[in-house]
Image (spheres, helix red, strand yellow):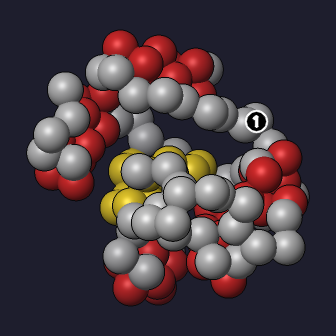
Amino acid sequence: MILSLLTRTLHRLGHDVTSYTDPTLCPIYTSKCCPCQNPIFCPHFIISDFDMPHINGILFLEELHKKGCRCRHFAIMSGSSIPKIILERIAGLNVKFFAKPFETAQITSWLRQIEPYAP
């Protein structure tokens, strides 16, 4: 349900959105290296859940980094209680954290901070 809400919200804000219910289906994750053709970066941002099938959000993002993903902005959201040490790890990776439930205005505000030109 949250994936659908975020997808609609991001589309409404003018973003092209590709979403996956399983992170291991993401082409960046399944490739040996980042498959993006853009020499600067792939997507402008990636938003991942913390609790996902097959892998948690931190390990997913770390794997993308290892593969050379050039995305500049990452966010993780979670509805479960996250231990302080995990929150510190997320912050150390320069990843924005959203605790569920959150307002779509929080996502919108973050997007305006990282991409001031965005609608």
Q: What element carries label 1?
A: loop
Looking at the picture, tell me which residue is in the foreground, 67 or 86: 67
Residue 117 position in % (x across, y down): 15, 40
The residue under the point 84% across, 54% down is 24
Q: Residue at x 22, y 54 (%)?
A: 114
Is residue 6 visible to us here? no
**Image-quadrant location for residue 28:** bottom right
Q: Position of residue 68 (x, y in %)?
A: 63, 77
Q: In this view, does 29 lie to the left or right of 87?
A: right
Residue 31 in sight here: yes
Percent across and percent down for residue 100 are 43, 41
**Residue placed most toward the observer, 118 or 103:** 118
Vertical relation: 59 (above or below) 15: below
| Drawn side of residue 106 relative to residue 6, left or right | left
Q: Which residue does the image show at 44% across and 66% down from the upper left?
A: 40
Q: Is residue 46 above or below residue 61?
A: above
What is the x, y in percent for residue 65?
60, 77
Q: Residues within 10 Å of mark 1 (few under 14, many from 20)?
A: few
**What amino acid does circle 1 point to?**
Thr
Q: Pointer 1: what residue?
A: 21
Position of 9 with respect to 42 (left or right) is left
Quadrant of residue 105 within the rendered picture:
top left
Q: Is residue 112 left or right of residue 69?
A: left
| The N terminus sits in image quarter | top right
Q: Residue at x 62, y 57 (%)?
A: 37
